[in-house]
């Protein structure tokens, strides 16, 4: 089983039958959260996702449909940093609060990672601080900026104080 | 191998089904023209009307609301945004300059003026790509913020972009609600007015900052990012998702780092993905993906540089872009 999970991580499980077998087995044994945890740690160590797009997409779907929760559902309420941003737009002003859940956080113990991994969807796993300045620079050129003149509040208003 | 990530037909049907009855698909080119007209009107209305209202922003299970006042007077825009949840925040936009007030931190951050000040019409190529990569549909009508709104759908034809739904006020063109959907038809992000007074006389005072004179002990900070300059960056994106074209390339100078920050912007006519290339040790330090609402990012290291793609596109699209950036 562990070998299969390892192959899955390396993107070597491309055939459908093997994929179904491994994911099915992981669901049954509760190993899905473990895999997610490994994956997240692996990502952090390698600095990028090495799972093939096809496999990770299918896994994301499998995970999204995965009801198994090893720990009580919790909102990630321990943001490492709250960054902020504001964007001047043609039609709107945006203030951005980035929820930062850095998995490379110093106190991100394996236990915490596993707990978080079990309670969040894969896409949220690598949520981390995105430089607000990038967002500002991007919004200056994005066609959605004037289009969404509806949304002067383009992104959520930060709920924490910015770093001084 | 194709770069397209196919959305299964049943998924697409699931997205379309609920509104299919009230929807008719327009001929692709006519639909794109119609869509452009709608987008142009929405951009114009948001800029040149005076209005006040409450905006509800939703992403995942988070919901935040803010009060917005927008004054258009003698060709000038003045805007005030105050959040209604959590610690008080206030954003003032005055003639392009943006100031964000953080009372609990006794801080005001000042953004540089944006140098883009008009909604650019889509190029024929972008219009073509809009029609080619989205199925544009004019939907039925429904009430948003107490107004009878016209629905519009942009259904993606591949996995390289999100789906979008817009509701506009037919009279003014003002966008009342915007929704971003992922490939499973789930709402990634939504903005909607819950109440809106449109085209009313709004007093300029209503858009003045609460802290017009900074109280004792407040700090004022400029953001690190500087004004952009259009120029060759020496970098290129070698694998753009289908339908995306480069709409801007340039540099920003005001960073501490030598060489500044290179930026290349790609767009499919509806959304954009920016690529940032920065010497390592700059702002961006983490690699991998991140997401907030409808914005995904992906960062990779390349030699002494950190490359980050960021935009209103699915995670896979920004990843493909980020990993294909090479030096010319």
Image: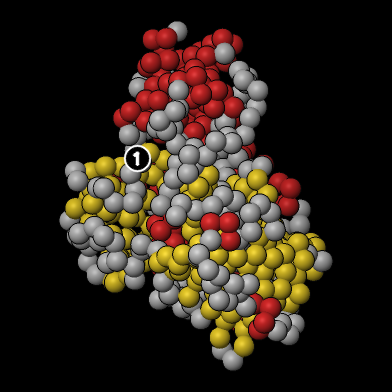
Q: Where is residue B78 in the image (x, y as percent from the top left)?
A: 59, 79
Q: Can residue B87 be seen in this view?
A: yes
Is residue A15 found left or right of B49 in the rendered image?
A: left
The residue pinned by badge 1 equals B287
Could you tell me which residue is drawn at 57 percent across and 81 percent down? B77
Look at the image and tell me in which quarter the N terminus of chain B lies. top left
Is residue B289 found left or right of B146 in the rendered image?
A: left
Could you tell me which residue is drawn at 76 percent across and 53 percent down? B21
Q: Where is residue A53 in the image (x, y as percent from the top left)?
A: 41, 34
Q: Where is residue B251 in the image (x, y as percent from the top left)?
A: 28, 65
Could you tell me which residue is drawn at 41 percent across and 71 percent down? B112
Q: Position of residue A152 (x, y in %)?
A: 60, 66
Is residue B228 found left or right of B295 in the rendered image?
A: left
Q: Is residue B33 visible?
A: no
> Which residue, as the protein is rendered here, is positioned at the far bottom?
B74
Q: Is residue A74 above or below residue B123?
A: above
**Residue A103 falls in which quadrant of the image?**
top left
Q: Is residue B171 above or below residue B296?
A: below
Could you tell me which residue is drawn at 73 percent across and 77 percent down? B198
How many numbered tags mark residues here?
1
Q: Which chain carries label 1?
A: B
């Amino acid at each position: 089983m562990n070998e299969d999970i390892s192959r899955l991580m390396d993107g070597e499980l491309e055939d459908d039958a093997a994929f179904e077998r491994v994911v099915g087995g992981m669901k049954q044994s509760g190993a899905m959260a473990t895999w997610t945890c490994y994956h997240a740690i692996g990502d952090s160590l390698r600095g990028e996702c090495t799972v093939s797009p096809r496999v990770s997409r299918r896994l994301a779907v499998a995970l999204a449909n995965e009801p198994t929760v090893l720990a009580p559902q919790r909102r990630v309420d321990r943001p490492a940093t709250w960054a902020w941003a504001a964007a001047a737009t043609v039609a709107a002003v945006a203030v951005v609060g980035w929820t930062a859940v850095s998995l490379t956080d110093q106190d991100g113990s394996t236990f915490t990672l596993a707990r978080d991994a079990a309670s969040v969807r894969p896409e949220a796993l690598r949520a981390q601080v995105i430089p607000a300045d990038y967002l500002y620079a991007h919004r200056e050129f994005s066609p959605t900026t004037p289009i969404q003149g509806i949304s002067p509040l383009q992104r959520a208003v930060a709920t924490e104080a910015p770093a001084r | 191998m194709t770069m397209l990530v196919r959305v299964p037909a049943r998924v697409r049907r699931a997205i379309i089904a609920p509104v299919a009855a009230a929807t008719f698909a327009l001929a692709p080119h006519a639909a794109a023209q119609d869509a452009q007209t709608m987008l142009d009107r929405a951009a114009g209305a948001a800029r040149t009307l005076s209005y006040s209202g409450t905006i509800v922003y939703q992403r995942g299970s988070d919901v935040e609301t803010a009060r917005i006042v927008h004054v258009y007077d003698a060709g000038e825009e003045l805007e005030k945004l105050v959040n209604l949840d959590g610690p008080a925040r206030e954003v003032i936009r005055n003639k392009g300059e943006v100031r964000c007030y953080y009372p609990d931190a006794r801080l005001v951050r000042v953004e540089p003026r944006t140098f883009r000040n008009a909604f650019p019409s889509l190029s024929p190529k972008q219009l073509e790509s809009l029609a080619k990569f989205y199925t544009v549909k004019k939907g039925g009508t429904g009430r948003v913020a107490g107004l009878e709104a016209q629905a519009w759908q942009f259904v993606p034809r591949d996995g390289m972009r999100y789906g979008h739904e817009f509701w506009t006020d037919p009279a003014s063109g003002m966008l009342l609600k915007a929704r971003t959907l992922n490939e499973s038809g789930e709402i990634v992000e939504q903005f909607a007015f819950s109440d809106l007074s449109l085209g009313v006389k709004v007093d300029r005072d209503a858009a003045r900052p609460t802290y017009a004179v900074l109280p004792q002990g407040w700090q004022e900070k400029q953001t690190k990012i500087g004004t952009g300059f259009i120029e060759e960056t020496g970098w290129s994106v070698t694998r753009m998702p289908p339908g995306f074209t480069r709409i801007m390339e340039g540099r920003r100078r005001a960073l501490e780092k030598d060489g500044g920050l290179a930026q290349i912007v790609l767009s499919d006519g509806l959304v954009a993905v920016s690529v940032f290339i920065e010497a390592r040790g700059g702002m961006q330090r983490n690699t991998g993906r991140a997401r907030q609402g409808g914005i995904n990012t992906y960062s990779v290291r390349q030699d002494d540089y950190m490359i980050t793609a960021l935009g209103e596109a699915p995670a896979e699209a920004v990843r493909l872009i980020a990993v294909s950036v090479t030096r010319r």
